[in-house]
Image: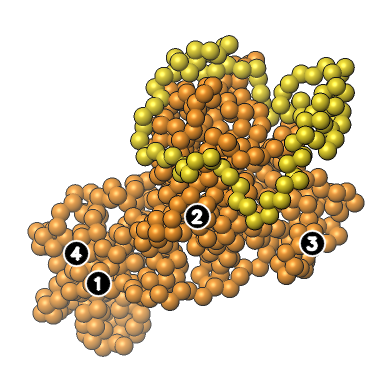
Chain colours: A orange, B yellow
Amino acid sequence: MTALAYTEPAPKVIAGLKDDWELVIGMEVHAQVASKSKLFSGASTAFGAEPNSNVSLVDAAMPGMLPVINEFCVEQAVRTGLGLKAEINLRSVFDRKNYFYPDLPQGYQISQYKHPVVGEGEVLVDMEPGVGRRVRIERIHLEQDAGKSIHDMDPAMSFVDLNRTGVALMEIVSRPDIRGPEEAAEYVRKLRQILRYLGTCDGNMQEGSLRADVNVSVCRRGAYEKYRETGDFSHLGTRCEIKNMNSMRFIQQAIEFEARRQIAIIEDGGTVDQETRLYDPVKGETRSMRSKEEAHDYRYFPDPDLLPLEFSQAWVDGIGASLPELPDDKKARFVKDYGVTEYDASVLTADVEHADFFEAVAKGRDGKQAANWVINELFGRLNKESTPVSESPVSAAQLGGVIDLIAKGDISGKIAKDLFEILWTEGGDPAEVVEARGMKQVTDTGAIEAAVDEVLAANPDKVEQAKAKPSMAGWFVGQVMKATQGKANPQAVQALVKQKLGVE
Amino acid sequence: MSVDNETVRRAAKLARIAVADEDVPGLAKELSSILDWVEQLSEVDVEGVEPMTSVTPMDLKRRTDEVTDGGIQDKILANAPDAREGFFAVPKVVE
């Protein structure tokens, strides 16, 4: 597989009053493992259930309950690690992260601190054709999700639902390699794409299956390069962490706001406090979550209820052998095998279903034409009607049939669009529809000639004008196409019109 | 190793344990002596020795991904001081 070549995008620069500032961003993405049951209990992970119904006595932290790990969740974490070309740790350890909150009945979250299951990896964040950022992944660890607190059901009370408590999360931690708000959003998009290809997380941001904590700092030009050379964080500015973002748009807005806030503080002679902040999308600003500060003393220690997590390299290799083709490889292959542009390849490989659909259409046909039809006609229409590709009224075989009819010269591109419309609304076999409705393109020169003659005879004045002004020929072509209900081969009509008018 | 009064107050706060001011110096002394006692372990040279996680050779027990539990809302809420509409109701905690 020949990989596509990328150059690094320029970092985002924000002009302050005194200086130019660059952004440095690192992310912690929490991806919910697509498992049926929780990480340490047999309760369901189904979304939207009756409150506190998907809760076992383990999740509720009843005395004497012991956690037992879900093997499938471990497998998904390893699978994700392999998908991010990361090092897999055959031995990892679960720790207790201690803090108090009503939606965490244990009083600690079971997480992995010093020995995570997955080590260093990499994500290529493609920004535009030929431009991409390689973001280093520091680690992925497995941990429990907390429950959900609802604050607006009662004026004096918060309501707690533990259904989500104990659901398995993969926390994917990046290095501070992201250099702008758009890159941050693209990073999350790319991660989501890879997770969905792997099937390890459904990536549903509305339902909270994918959430991001964003670390933002600013520095003067040249400082970031010094950090990369030396690994010394002191070259970078003080960072603030914006918690729990579940929308690409808000991530971008929050980073933009936060960077400007920090620049204003520094240029004013102040210092940025390292703190946890919350983004308020209504006000478009971040604000401090002071209560989190004290709690930052998590007093991690190894969870005495759980032995170290150990597995064999052979088991990891088995998972590796079952990995699907991943987005970067698929994209490169589409460019190479089907001759589509890198941009089109990105669109086609956005998710597996779309890519599979395209391949079914393109197989044995002209790749570029297939890409045009799949992207412009089919995806365009699906988007417009908010229909998923799995429920497309026009199948890959039908669309392929349309393209075959064009290739054979049976129908023109214009008629093909009408045919697509019929297939979309009424269905049917493309060749049969064309036959039954007399949509076949007239390639018989005799019939086209007759139609041309008829139009010329009916418009003697225009014929005279056209002889002086050859661009008028187009008008005759239009008339003939109209007279033949678009079935005449446009190239043949054009040639004949010009020939008969005696113009070039 | 010595625990001062401030550390006692901080540990108590993090553990959500109410400690009266007059009890702090006593606790500091007790905690210090406990830590000093445990500290003796550091006299043992464990260079190159794997930490022991279990006294018998055991692997972490695993389960398959099946839903085998839950659906016991009444039991989960049974001990709650206040429960409404299927939720635990707690004093307002909002950022």
Who comes first in sequence, dot 1 or dot 2?
2
Where disc 2 sits, the SS reads loop
Check if mark 1's residue and mark 2's residue have beta carbons within 8 Å: no
Residue picked out by circle 1: A365
The residue indicated by pointer 2 is A90
What is the CA distance from the residue labelled 1 to the residue labelled 4?
10 Å
Q: CA distance from mark 2 to mark 3?
A: 34 Å
Quadrant containing the N terminus of chain A is bottom left
Label 4: few (<14), some (14–19) or many (≥20) C-alpha neighbours in 10 Å: some
Estimate the x, y position of residue A157 in percent, counting from the top left: 62, 17
Check residue B67 in the rendering and tell me which mark sits there, or answer none.
none
Residue A81 seen from this side: yes
Name the residue carrying label 4: A401
**Amino acid carrying mark 4 in the image:** Gly
Q: Position of residue A192 (x, y in %)?
A: 48, 52
The residue depicted at 49 percent of the width and 63 percent of the height is: A85
Q: Whole-Å distance between the Cαs marked 4 and 2? A: 51 Å
Distance from disc 3 to disc 4, alpha carbons, whole Å, reads: 60 Å
Q: Secondary structure at mark 4?
A: helix
Q: Position of residue A140 (x, y in %)?
A: 55, 51
The residue wearing badge 3 is A235
| Callout 4: chain | A
User: Which is closer to the viewer, label 1 or label 2?
Assistant: 2
Tell me which label, 4 or 2, sits earlier in the chain: 2
The quadrant in which residue A13 appears is: bottom right
